[in-house]
Image: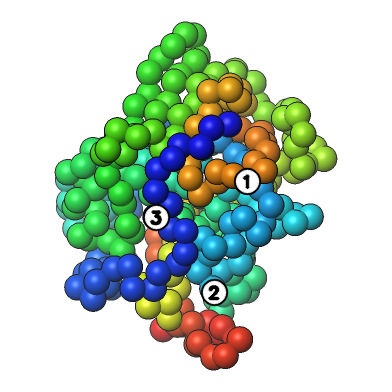
Amino acid sequence: MTQCGCRAKFATFDFEARPTSAQSTFTHFMKLDVLADLDHLFMVNFSVEAARLQALMPPHLRLLTREGRAFPSIVLPEIRNLQQRSLGFPKVDYDLFGLRILVEYESSQLGLTKGIYFSRLIMDPNHVRRVANVMTAFDFERGTITRQTTGENSTDITVALPSGKKMFHANVHTSGEFPSALTEGSCFETAEEALAMYNDIAYGFLPSADGRRMHILQIADPHLNYEAWPLRHLEVDRESIIIPTELADAEVQLEPCYYVGQLPRYWRWLKTERVKVEPGILTPEIV
């Protein structure tokens, strides 16, 4: 695997990364629940020594680990027909790149909960990204996401920054089979364990810029059974992979990867929790 050489924007967590005006915009708009079709999702999964990801974590989220290893993924969905449920905004299409990390959070509503945290997000096209950055607190970066068919069920994927540098690249092949095998060197004992780790997820966590609130996004309601998804095994050419800087210089293990076909999704926001910050203690309560 090759280091991409691009900047590590989230090498440390910066509570002041977004200005006050963006924070106030967020509190006004973020509660908009949305529907969309998630389609042609490529999920390239890894395991890595947990200590190598710790710098990417806000203090009130903790890495989900197994025998000292954490679980980052590169997720590349096509989002189609995104629509807000009540305000009548026009439908929106875009492509997304996310550096997704599996985490745990001690929620006052849900208890100790498995979920996802995005340490980096790229949205294409740029005009949709600009609107999204005004209306939400997600920090979508500018970039170009290209998918080129290279053969039957084979795709060459490139994510490039405005400078032209490749942030991610892989050549992948989608099989017609439900995932049932492990990759060589996998930290999992069975394919079923890997499937559950990377797919059995119902919540996403978005810390506020000041670190004192946790916004919780329910990814699907009701939470769908991933075994019933249009889920297929994804073969990834190891030699073709360029990984983000955040994962460079680490002992990265390629884990079972997946392709998901069209899947309707409903995202809704739960009540925001205030995180009480005391020396050595972070206690959530509903705002």
- Nearest-to-viewer mark from 1 and 2: 1
Residue under label 3, please give it.
9
User: What kind of residue is marked 3?
Assistant: Lys
Location of residue 24 in the rendering, given as x and y in whole percent from the top left corner = 23, 75
Q: x and y percent of residue 97 in the render?
A: 40, 41
C-alpha distance separating marks 3 and 1? 17 Å
Q: Does residue 139 appear in this view?
A: yes
Q: Is residue 71 above or below residue 206?
A: above
- Asked which quadrant contains residue 268, the reply is bottom left
- Dot 2, crowdedness within 10 Å: few (<14), some or many (≥20)? many
- Residue 265 x, y percent position in the rendering: 42, 45
Q: Secondary structure at mark 3?
A: loop
Amino acid type of the residue that numbered disc 1 sits on in the rendered structure: Ala
Given residues 89 and 60, the one toward you in this image is 60
Please report contact status of discs 2 and 3: CB closer than 8 Å, yes or no: no
193 displayed left or right of 287: right
What kind of residue is marked 2? His
Colour approach in the figure: rainbow
Q: Quadrant of residue 31?
A: bottom left
Residue positioned most to the top: 151
Residue 83 circle label: none
Q: Earlier in the sequence, mark 3 or mark 1?
A: 3
Disc sitting over residue 250 in the figure:
1
Name the residue: 17% across, 43% down: 127
Q: Secondary structure at mark 1?
A: loop
N-terminal label among 1 and 2: 2
Query: Who's the residue at 53% across and 56% down the image?
Result: 116
Label 2 vs label 3: CA separation?
Answer: 20 Å
Looking at the picture, how far across and down is residue 80, in whole percent?
31, 37
Q: Nearer the viewer, residue 109 or 181?
A: 181
Residue under label 2: 60
